[in-house]
Image (spheres, helix red, strand yellow):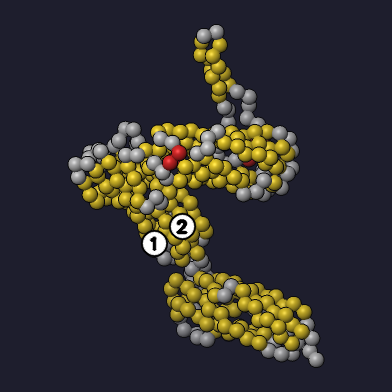
């Protein structure tokens, strides 16, 4: 990516390209983030992904910003070849009004010096509010339906309209409807619904709202969700404690699903550890009995895999540990 600077020479403005991009620019998946128009006071967050796609280790030596309204921090400074991390930028829109563009200077000192310039931008406005300040779908099980909404209220412009809503991912479906209007303000509700096939993981995305207001043609609504597997185990680690070789100890574990299922097989990895289901029926919760009969002393660690008849996310694992003492 080329950066450009403008130089005043002999009373005339002339555009001239700056030096070519350095090697470190290629570590970032993007070099800028425009948050668009945002309510005054909203805290804006964006993560820049960094990947060491070189053949040598790289190291971030310093990060600085051009405005106190922005903070930036890398989760990890030293990266071996192939490693990834993120640089998280936070912009406090209560610290300014109107359009503000801030540069983040990221310096590297390994394998040699280079500087990457990122920028973030926002238009902090006091003529509308967003309640709450994001669409938070929370923690949801994969396969379950979940939706949440925010209300956008526009002040001093009763003709304000939301003309369209778009999402950055097909896994989120958004809709909008007008909920109130007076001579002084108009309010719209933006609702986001998560598809049942949304992959497992933590999601951070945006819903973009288009308006008929020339000074803010689109608004950004941040969305967060953590999709958990359709199967879960409680506890995920079973500590059987101390047991003598030749002895016996057992505990219970619960496998939960978003809908009824059958346990078709349990792989425990050997005869010492036996895991049995309390029911052969299809149900949402299964209680498994975990029984250990160790034959030799030492630390016992085993991963147990539970296979079910669910079509998606059909298996889950849990770990069993114990300290086996010698048989006397």
Residue sitting at the far bottom: 328
Specify the label residue 225 is tagged with. 2
Does residue 163 show up?
Answer: no
On the image, the x and y values in percent for residue 249 come to 66, 87
In the image: residue 231, left or right of residue 170: right
In the image: residue 111, left or right of residue 159: right
Does residue 157 show up?
Answer: yes
Instruction: Say which residue label 1 marks.
Output: 146
Who is closer to the viewer here, 216 or 256? 216
Q: Dot 2, crowdedness within 10 Å: few (<14), some or many (≥20)?
A: some
Does dot 1 land on a helix, a strand or a loop? strand
In the image: residue 244, left or right of residue 212: right
Label 2 vs 1, first from the N-terminus: 1
Q: How many marks?
A: 2
Point out the image quarter for the C terminus: bottom right
The residue located at (37%, 59%) in the rendering is 147
Who is closer to the viewer here, 327 or 181? 181
Q: Could you tell me if the residues under marks 2 and 1 are in contact, i.e. CB atoms within 8 Å?
A: yes
Q: Dot 1, crowdedness within 10 Å: few (<14), some or many (≥20)?
A: some
The residue located at (56%, 46%) in the rendering is 88
Specify the label residue 29 is tagged with. none
Who is closer to the viewer here, 86 or 82? 86
Point out the image quarter for the N terminus: top right
Does dot 2 land on a helix, a strand or a loop? strand
Who is closer to the viewer here, 233 or 70? 70
On the image, the x and y values in percent for residue 143 come to 44, 65
On the image, the x and y values in percent for residue 229 come to 51, 66
In three-dimensional space, the C-alpha distance between marks 2 and 1, rounded to whole angstroms, equals 10 Å
> Is 320 above or below relative to 177?
below
The residue located at (68%, 37%) in the rendering is 108
On the image, the x and y values in percent for residue 302 come to 68, 75
Residue sitting at the far top: 10
């Amino acid at each position: 990516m080329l950066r450009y600077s403008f130089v005043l020479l002999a009373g005339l403005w002339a555009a001239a390209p700056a030096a070519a991009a350095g090697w470190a620019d290629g570590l970032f998946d993007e070099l800028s983030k425009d948050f668009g128009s945002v309510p005054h006071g909203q805290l804006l967050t964006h993560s820049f992904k960094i990947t060491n796609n070189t053949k040598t280790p790289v190291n971030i030596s310093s990060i600085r910003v051009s405005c106190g309204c922005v903070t930036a921090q890398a989760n990890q400074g030293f990266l071996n070849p192939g490693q990834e991390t993120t640089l998280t930028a936070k912009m406090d829109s209560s610290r300014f009004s109107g359009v503000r563009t801030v540069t983040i200077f990221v310096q590297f000192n390994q394998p040699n010096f280079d500087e990457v310039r990122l920028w973030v931008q926002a238009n902090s406005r006091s003529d509308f509010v967003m309640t709450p300040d994001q669409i938070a779908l929370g923690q949801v099980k994969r396969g379950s339906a979940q939706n949440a909404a925010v209300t956008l209220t526009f002040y001093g412009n009763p003709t304000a309209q939301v003309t369209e809503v778009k999402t950055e991912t097909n896994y989120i479906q958004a809709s909008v409807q007008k909920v109130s209007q007076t001579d002084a303000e108009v309010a719209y509700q933006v609702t986001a619904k998560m598809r049942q096939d949304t992959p497992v993981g933590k999601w951070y995305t945006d819903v973009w709202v288009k308006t008929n207001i020339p000074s803010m043609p689109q608004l950004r609504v941040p969305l967060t969700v953590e999709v958990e597997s359709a199967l879960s185990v409680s506890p995920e680690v079973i500590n059987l404690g101390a047991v003598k070789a030749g002895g016996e100890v057992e505990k219970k574990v619960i496998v939960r699903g978003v809908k009824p299922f059958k346990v078709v097989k349990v792989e425990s990895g050997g005869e010492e550890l036996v895991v049995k289901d309390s029911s052969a029926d299809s149900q949402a919760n299964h209680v498994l009995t975990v029984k250990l009969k160790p034959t030799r002393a030492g630390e016992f660690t085993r991963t147990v895999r539970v296979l079910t008849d669910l079509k998606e996310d059909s298996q889950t694992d849990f770990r069993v540990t114990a300290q086996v003492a010698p048989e006397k």
